[in-house]
Image (cartoon, rainbow, N blue to C red):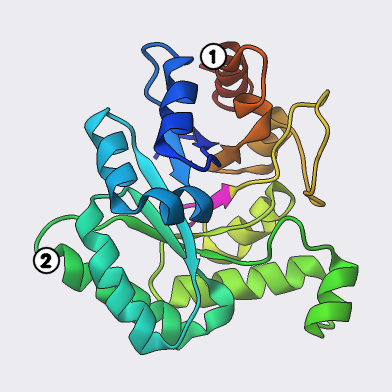
Amino acid sequence: MGRDVIIACDFSSSEETLEFLEKLGDERPYVKIGMELFYAEGPDIVKMLKMRGHKVFLDLKLHDIPNTVNKAMKVLAGLGVDMCNVHAGGTVDMMKAAIDGLKAGCGTGSRPLLIAVTQLTSTTEERMRRDLMIDRDMESVVSHYALNAKNAGLDGVVCSPLESGKVHDVCGQGFLTVTPGVRFADDDKGDQARVTTPAKAKELGSDYIVVGRSITGAADPAAAYRRCVSEFTGR
């Protein structure tokens, strides 16, 4: 599976989303729909983007008791997304329930990729220790969560590019790393704490990078997208 750039469409409406995508011309990039947009527009936004020819990563980060997540995944399976996720902190049992629900919802058809969030890229090691009472270093925690996700049957994890190499060391090269926290070298890092550039993410072994404001907030989004693809994939 080749590397790809996923654009985070963190907008509040379908109108804003379409206005942005029109700026990309004939490009049909992989896009991420997060909570803000999905809660505003519901399943229709997924259907609309799929009809336009986009691959869709539905980023809802499910985290609940196993039975609830299982049932939610059965519903999400019917939307035709290409990737979706849960929180690895929900335990191995919850992740197993999630993938079982996804398979059940897809029936005999192919299922979306299912990945697990390890630690958010806004979380520093100090905050993890202070707020979450996790007294291990970030790399160890992310690697352990990733191994749990692999053992639960998931396809990969969301992590910082800085942890991609370690995740692959622990879980194998075929286990996907989907990495937000990516900015161009000349951009502000915003509220992200563990960040790097597209070129560095490639060097560190990320399989997918999720890029938001560096593209969506650019004066020329099409040029910014092409620059990102070039730096990350070499295409």
**x, y percent for residue 7:** 52, 34
Range covered by the magenta-colored residues: 173-178
Q: Residue at x 77, y 44 (%)?
A: 195
Q: Residue at x 85, y 67 (%)?
A: 125
> Disc 2, disc 1: CB below 8 Å?
no
Q: Is residue 58 visible?
A: no
Q: Which mark is residue 107?
A: 2
Identify the residue at horizontal 61%, vertical 23% (top origin): 228
Q: How many C-alpha atoms fall within 10 Å of the one at disc 2: few (<14), some, or many (≥20)? A: few
Image quarter (top left, top right, bottom left or bottom right) of the N terminus: top left
Q: Secondary structure beneath disc 2?
A: loop
Q: Identify the residue position indicated by label 1 in the image.
A: 222
The amino acid type of the residue labelled 2 equals Gly
Q: Which mark is residue 189?
A: none
Residue 69 in view: yes
Is residue 177 in the magenta section? yes
Residue at figure coordinates x 69%, y 42% from the top left: 204
Three-letter residue code for mark 1:
Ala
Q: In terms of image quadrants, where is residue 101?
A: bottom left
Q: Is residue 156 left or right of residue 225?
A: left
Q: Is residue 204 left or right of residue 35?
A: right
232 or 32: nearer the viewer: 32
* Mark 2 / mark 1, whichever is N-terminal: 2
